[in-house]
Image (cartoon, coloured by chain):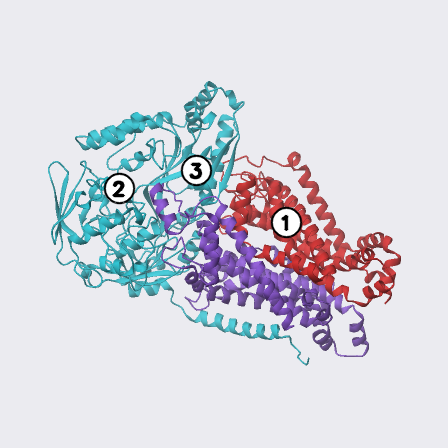
Chain colours: A cyan, B purple, C red
Amino acid sequence: MKQTIPPPLRSASVLTVCLLGFALGACGSGENRVTAGNRDGVLHWGNASEPQGLDPHIATGVPEHKIIMALMEGLVLKDTTTLEPIPGVAKRWEISDDGLVYTFYLRENARWSNGDPHNAHDYVWSWWRALQPALGNLYAYMYFPIKNAQAYYEGKISDFDQVGVKALDDFTLQVSLNDPTPYFLQLLDHYSLFPVHRPTIEKFGAPDERGTRWTFEGNLVGNGAFQLEEWKINRYVRVGRNPYYWGAGDVKLNQIYFYPTENITTEERMFRAGQLHYTYEVPVDKVAVYQEKGSGELQIYPYLGSYFYRFNTRVEHLSDRRVRRALAMAVDRQQITDQVLKAGQVPSYAVTPPDTMGYFPESDLTFDPDKARALLTEAGYPDGAGFPKTEILYNTSEEHRKVAVAIQQMWKQYLNIDVTLLNQEWKVYLDSETNMDYEISRASWIGDYVDPNNFLDMWLCNGGNNRTGWCNPEYDRLVLEAAPKASSHEERLEIFKTAEKMLLADMPVLPIYIYTSKHLINPAIRNFPKNILNQPSFKDIYLDPSAARVAEAH
Amino acid sequence: MLRFAAGRLLQAIPVLLVVITATFLLVHSAPGGPFSAEKAVPAEVIKALEAQYQLDQPLWKQYVSYLGDIVNGNFGPSFKYPGRSVNELIAAGLPITAELGLYAMLIAVLIGISAGVFASLRPNTLQDYVPMSAAMLGICMPSFLLGPLLVLIFGIYLEWLPVSGWGDIPGDKILPSITLGAAYAAYIARLSRGQMLEVLSQDYIRTARAKGLPEPLIVVKHALRGGLIPVVAFLGPAFAGLLGGSFVVETIFQIPGLGRFYVQAAFNRDYTMILGMTIFFASLIILFNLLSDMLAIWLNPKLRHGSGAAKP
Amino acid sequence: MSTALATAEKGSSLWADAWIKLSRNHLALFGLAVVLTLCLVSLLTPWIAPYGYEQQNLMLGASPPSAEHWLGTDVFGRDMLTRIMYGGRVSLLVGFIATAVALLIGVLWGAVAGFVGGRVDTVMMRMVDILYALPFMIFIVLLMVVFGRNIFLLFFAIGAVEWLTMARIVRGQVMSLRRQEFVEAAHSLGLSQWAIIRRHIIPNTLGPVIVYTTLTIPSVMLLEAFLSFLGLGIQPPQSSWGLLINYGVETMEEYPWLLIFPGIALSLTLFALNFLGDGLRDALDPRASKD
């Protein structure tokens, strides 16, 4: 018992010395990650969350999407500005006059990232795999325009030869459709229709087996401009150039790091400290700061996404369309977008974002408190008297909370009704919404492809994404039968307009605003596209160190 | 002492069994399944997935087969990250959280005890008030405030240290360790001051002083030992708190540790992951409580014979 | 040692003694005054608050302190002073009630385990271990779904977590006291178990318990913020200090007053409680009463 300092104290002082050494060492290194990246062609990308997996036939999330876009490629690509289809693996294609048969001519120099030849048979096999029910592909519906694909997926036919996809020879792929589908070429650029490398998948399990290790570091073989180099869980995914890519000569970046930046406040600080080139999001309250700064780092542009509230039409007082419309008319959307969200969001009075493939929804909905009060009186609640207990459900998030608090107050002010707010953790919220255990619920829809169909077919009577209890057989007929048979693009859009007007007249949903994409982008990033799908083309992006220096000098 | 430890480890088995059972029931009755998603999931897909993970079997069967797997050290596959096993994910996050926890604990103990002892030597003077006020602020200041504050000062304004990461950029371990350790340093400072005051007023200290022993010797050799007892008792729970609290720090600093996995798993209803992490954490907590109790006994010989747990 | 006998003799005057000593301690009196003032303000808030806590002015948005809004406004243009006053009601209520729950369970549990010892102690402390190890967040989500949203549930949930550490501390203290000379002396003098607990164990455990209590109240207030953030507990437009601080952190660079003022409110309460707690501990210290 001779010790003068107890052991914990002793080791602690050792630690302090170490920490001090650390701190001093840290001060020595002057160059940050972004500056080094600009010099070496390494892009540091904020990617929201850890990817669940990189199998294009299983993945569903946006972060996964971004990484897969770097690793794999479909038959066609989209022009990053106009979103028009441009050649991808297919160097050209032909469409039959009736719009039902597509013939794709593939590049002979396309290769998998391990050097294997890449041809039309890969597509037939990959699409067969993607339609195996056991695989649990949530995007299987993206295949349904293809002839018999839905019947095959649902087990009504078992012979895959009847499905409309055929390899005419090694480099010619023919696809037949059920109906002329104007957006079909767009779908081919969605990762759920990407080809996968058969030998790799079969090496790690059955073709329709979920959760094999084929997409992991060292295993994954893709056909994109980049290949997977390293995958550190919850730390980063790193991709590097794929030397076998058909356009490898034009790829400019050497590497991309994707970081799981769940915490957007931290993400913004990482950007400021020179640890990121690009942020996935920008915190609401930082938007004004960057706008004032005027450094050009903040980029805001329209996004094909709609923010709205669902009404549970099975709740007694909300089953009255007058009540639903009254509530919708008493929301001052302009104030919400200008004063609460402040990032260029557009107030919306319909579900489909305007200018979706030339489609502009027509809506008679306006902000009209007087009319709203009149409607509410008509429904039996003069000046809000006797309005039953109503709750707005939203999943835990700063932005949803702010919108809900503002709407709660607007309804109090204009209609004199009290609604309560309820935030639930994501999975509980999903459960409540799916089971229709809610009154009013926050929701949104981000377009998978640019077509009004994507926003309107969710309100079908039995649509899994409907969740409002609203059902109108005439609406279903328009969307399911009339629109696909339309003889021209204009006629098709007219049918959608009629359908959407029916939807808005009944108002099972309360449109609020159209999203914007907002990112902090380092000035060195060049060729960064601003399209409504928020879809980058990593093979075109390059880093220009001189641009960053100019920006710093200002 | 060995018998005491062995006895406690034996008792850990029923404790773990209760923890496993309770957690198993909890996760399976929590609303929202692992496969629910914003886009409607077709019923046939859910069925296929449930079959793959044996979720279509009766609960008791799942339970029995799960217990069987655990005995073999297999925590099963993660639901959220297809293809990855829970063992693999824990192995990926453990070294990082362990390192973070260790640094934080050392900071807490070092700063906490020194500040507490320092303050207790001159009670109700400036030497007491200043460190104790700082400690109160430290307790008051939650890590979700302290972390961003430190980041803004040292990461953004001064540009001395990185704002995130763990082992990626030199110096990125400093701020998270301080953030996590600060609150515990403050607790320990308060606890040790309180106990030191008690001990310093006791007779054997007075005797020592009367004998004319130098004050530093009295403090370090005689008083500190008694003064550390509540601190040591606090270390076990503090360790549990550190593990639980690490997720806030790991989120603020983008650290790929266990805390973040655990919270993600809970949010995603990744059943096997939640269970695996709970069992793992529970074992660690039991172990550290045991160590903290053993340390307390070692510091206070009177307990050696009195400890109920040591009786056969 | 005469301490034990001394307290035993004048056990009934312990409280009166303590009060006299407390009233001589200026810091403690200051703490008491602050705590009482805060409680009073909280009680009267609905009548004295300058604005409604949910009253928005979106056009104004976040504004720094001014003549109309002494402590500024938040991003919805709501008056911060009003929101802090209303938030204090929730925070103080949660702080006191949940801590009381934790105190009650924790002290009883720890004291019994420590005093009885043996098998009982083993079983009781293993139960504490189990509760420590359970995944807190799942537990909360489940509670929320099974029982619905309810402020008393919040107290329960917080109390259920916070008593564990209290129990461990008390047990440790009691076990070390049980072997001290004056307790053994009391035993040999033939005092009953209950009398020993009441006259020796409780007064001697009060110190650490009070210290820990003053530490528990703020941590409870912050835990409340976390739970409300998850959706258990209070919902907007209501607020609490913890939640206000939580939101304030997000915008501390842009609108620092949204963080500073609720932070001051919480810190003030904390310091006041702390001074009061220290004063109480000194006043109730049985050894000190002899001097």
| Residue that badge 1 annotates | C159
* Few, some or many residues within 10 Å of mark 2 (<14, 14–19, 20+): few
Quarter of the image with the C terminus of chain B in it: bottom right
Foreground residue, A287 or C88?
A: C88
> What residue sits 25% from the left and 60% below the top?
A200
> What residue sits 41% from the left and 66% below the top?
B168
For the residues bearing labels 2 and 1, Cβ distance under 8 angstroms: no
> On what subunit does the disc labeled 1 rest?
C
Residue reaching furthest to the bottom: A2
Secondary element type, mark 3: helix
> On what subunit does the disc labeled 3 rest?
A
**x%, y% of residue A183?**
22, 40
The label shown at residue A433 is 3
Residue type highlighted by circle 2: Gly
Q: Say if residue B160 shows up in the picture.
A: no
Secondary element type, mark 1: helix
Q: Earlier in the sequence, mark 3 or mark 2?
A: 2
The label shown at residue A81 is none
| Residue that badge 2 annotates | A155
Foreground residue, B68 or A395?
A: B68
Say above or below: C146 vs C286: above
Q: Quadrant of residue A9?
A: bottom right
Closer mark to the observer between disc 2 and disc 1: 2
Residue type highlighted by circle 1: Gly
